[in-house]
Image (tube, rainbow, N blue to C red):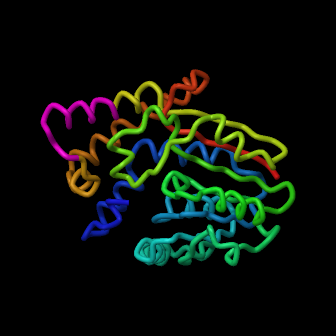
Amino acid sequence: MEIYHSQADQPILDWQWLEPGLRNITAIILRHLPSGGGKALDVGHGTGRVTFQLAARGFQVDAVDVEPRIVELAKRLAAARHESDCYFRVGDFRDPEVVVPDHYDLVVCSEVLEHVVDYESIYENIYRSLKPGGRVIITVPYDPKKFSVLDSYNGHVRRFSYSQVMNDLRPYRSKKIIITGFPFYQLLCRAYLLKLSLTGGQHSNEELWTKRSTRVIARMIYPLCRFDNFFAFTCLGTNLIAIAEK
């Protein structure tokens, strides 16, 4: 992922915590948590965007990510927040050796699978990790037809279709799909791509998120992204959230 090579940490943090689409996805995840807390696993935790929210809602959270620098950054954030219920570690969740079978009440895997060529092994390990009756929440970019330069720069190897996700969730006894990001977030992305096309500019998350104007606009756009959720029934959005139970 291009922004993970940023020389400074702040653009990474601003992107993961302020980007309006990611904030909206996090809000949807939090609305679909199982009640009662318990043990949770955050697969591909990044800087802890979801991890810290799960801990605040009573979960004891293990978190794993393949990027050592990002794991260290998340650990520093946890120390600064005096967070004692989040445990971050480096690991590749394609490896079956990292799995503790039937251990978690909840597994979250948010904006990860689109980066992984052989992502099916992650699905298999998530299923093994869950207790019977446990819940998984997976979020991915939606609709292969919407693949753009933004996906390429973000290190995406694919966007997912509805049927592909449903097929991947075959072993689960119940499934729910939410598709969000239409019309406002999709319009924002198209407007940005049009700007790049007209100016001949090159997209760079690092350069974008070093600008104060980006952070201001992101905060202003977020309420509109939340409003997109009312249009989920159209299935025209840019992001898919899947909730399933083992």
Q: Residue at x 62, y 68 (%)?
A: 94
| Image height of 228 relative to 11, above or below | above
Quadrant containing the N terminus in the rendered view:
bottom left
Residue 193 in magenta?
yes
Looking at the image, the residue that sits furthest to the left is: 199
Towards the viewer: 64 or 146: 146
* Total numbered labels: 0
Residue 51 place in picture, x, y as percent: 57, 63
Q: Residue at x 67, y 36 (%)?
A: 177
Residue 195 in magenta?
yes
Residue 90 place in picture, x, y as percent: 53, 77
Residue 33 place in picture, x, y as percent: 70, 50
Q: Residue at x 61, y 47 (%)?
A: 29
Q: Is residue 53 left or right of residue 41?
A: left
Q: Is residue 64 left or right of residue 68?
A: right
Q: Is residue 206 left or right of residue 49?
A: left
Looking at the image, the residue that sits furthest to the front is: 118
Residue 52 place in picture, x, y as percent: 55, 63
Examine the residues drawn in magenta and state their main secondary structure. Answer: helix
Towards the viewer: 142 or 9: 142
Q: Residue at x 77, y 52 (%)?
A: 35
Q: Is residue 132 left or right of residue 90?
A: right
The residues colored magenta run 189-202
Towards the viewer: 154 or 107: 154
| Image height of 80 relative to 183, above or below | below
Where on the picture, by quarter, is residue 163?
Answer: top right
| Image height of 207 relative to 147, above or below | below
